[in-house]
Image (tube, rainbow, N blue to C red):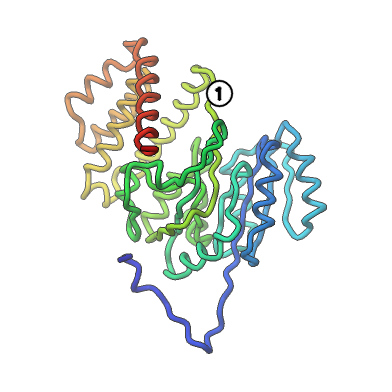
Amino acid sequence: MSVLAGHRVKLSENTAVKHPVVSILALCFNHEKFLDEALLSIENLTYPHLDVWVVDDASSDSSPEILRHWQNKRPDWHFVLQETNLGNCRTFNQLLHQCSGDWVIDFATDDLLEKDALQHWVARAESAPGIGFCYADGIVLDQETGKRKRFSETISRNTFPEGKILPELLSQPFICPPAVLFNKEALLNLGGYDENLHYEDWDAWLRISHQYPVLFHPEAVITYRKHPASMSASLVLKRNRKILQSTVRILERIEHWPEFLTNPGSMAGFTRYHLRMCFGLQLPEEAHLFYQVLQRTGNQKWSDTVLYKLAGSLPFMYPVYKAFRQFRTWMQMRGKED
C-alpha cells in the first residue's frame, strides 16, 4: 500500500473538478532526425490541458527550419529559436518561470510521449496533494536494433518506492529519466535545475525528495530513445570526467543531510562505486575527490585507500574496465531476455 494513500481525496458530485494544466518543455538540440516524430507525439496527446513550449538551443542542423514549419502549424504553442547555445539546465529554468502549468515535463525532442498516457499519469499525481514529482515507467527504444522494452524490465529491481525515497536514490537506479512529472511549485521553490552541473536529473530528484514525498505511476508514459555509442574513447573519458565531477559536487551538498547521517551505508556504497569507476577509468583527480567524501563521512576502508592510490598509476586498467562493463551489460540484457 502506498504511504501516501491517506492523502487521496474523494470528490463529491457537487465539487468542481479542477483540470490541471501540464506544461511540456520540449528542448531541441540537433534532433533533426527525430524532431517531427517527437512533436507529432505531443500533438496527438489526448490530454487537452496542455501548455507547450518548444525551444531550439542553437542547433547546427536543420532543426530550426523544421520548427519554423511547426510554428506556422501550431500557433497555440510557444516557440523559441535561440541564437546562442545556453545548455539544457539554463534553457529549462528560463521556461520554468514562463510556463503556466501545474505540472511540468522536461521533454527531449528525440523522445516520444505515449498518446493516451498523460490522462492517467496526471490523475495519479493529483491523487496525493503535496508531492514533489510523480515518476512513471517508460519504454526504452534501442535506436540501433529497433527493439523496445519497458524500462522496468531493464533494471535489476522489482520494487518502486514512494513517499520519502531519498536514501533509495543512492541505491540501484529505478527512475526512468524522462518519465518524471514535476510539481512546478516544488521545482520553483528549490530554484529549478542547478546550472553549474553537467547533468541535472538526479540532482533535482534528490533536492525535491529531501523536502517532498513522491509517487510512482506504473504505466509506460514515454518512449526513451537510446542512441548507439559512437564517441571515441577520449571523448568518452572527457564526458565521464564531467559527470563524475558533477556527482562529487552533489555528494558534497548532501553528505550532511540527516537522512544520510542516520543511514551512512547508502552514501558510502554510492561513493565507493564511483571511486571504483575512477580507478577503472584511471582518473586520479576525481578518485581523490570521492575518497575525500568517504574520509569526511568516516566511511573509508583500507581498500578505498588502495584504489585511490593506484588511480592514474595503471594505464592498462581502462581497456580492461571498459571490456568488463560491456560484458556485464551484455550479461544483464541476456538475462532480461531469458
Q: Residues within 10 Å of mark 1 (few under 14, many from 20)?
A: few
Q: Is residue 60 left or right of residue 284?
A: right
Residue with the most extreme left position? 302
Question: Which residue sits at x=26%, y=21%?
Answer: 307
The quarter of the image holding the N terminus is bottom left
Residue 273 in the image, given as x and y percentages of width and height: 30, 32
Q: Report x, y in % for residue 215.
A: 40, 60
- Residue furthest to the bottom in view is 14
Which residue is under mark 1? 230
Question: Residue 66: horizontal and vertical position, in percent?
Answer: 77, 42
The vertical placement of 20 against 277, above or below, is below
- Tag 1's secondary structure? loop
Residue 77, position as x, y percentages in the image: 73, 57
Quadrant of residue 9 in the image? bottom left
Residue 234 located left or right of residue 335? right
- The residue at the point 23 percent across, 47 percent down is 261
* Left-right relation of 304 to 244: left
Pick the residue in front: 132 or 328. Answer: 328
Residue found at the very far front of the displayed protein: 338
- Measuring 52% from the left and 38% from the top, which residue is drawn there? 147
The residue drawn where x is 28% and y is 28% is 291
User: Number of numbered discs present?
Assistant: 1
In front here: 167 or 62? Answer: 62
Q: Quadrant of residue 164?
A: bottom left
Type of residue at label 1?
Ser
- The reply, left or right, for residue 228 in relation to residue 213 is right
13 up-or-down from 279: above or below: below
Q: In front: 308, or 316?
A: 316
Q: Quadrant of the C terminus?
A: top left
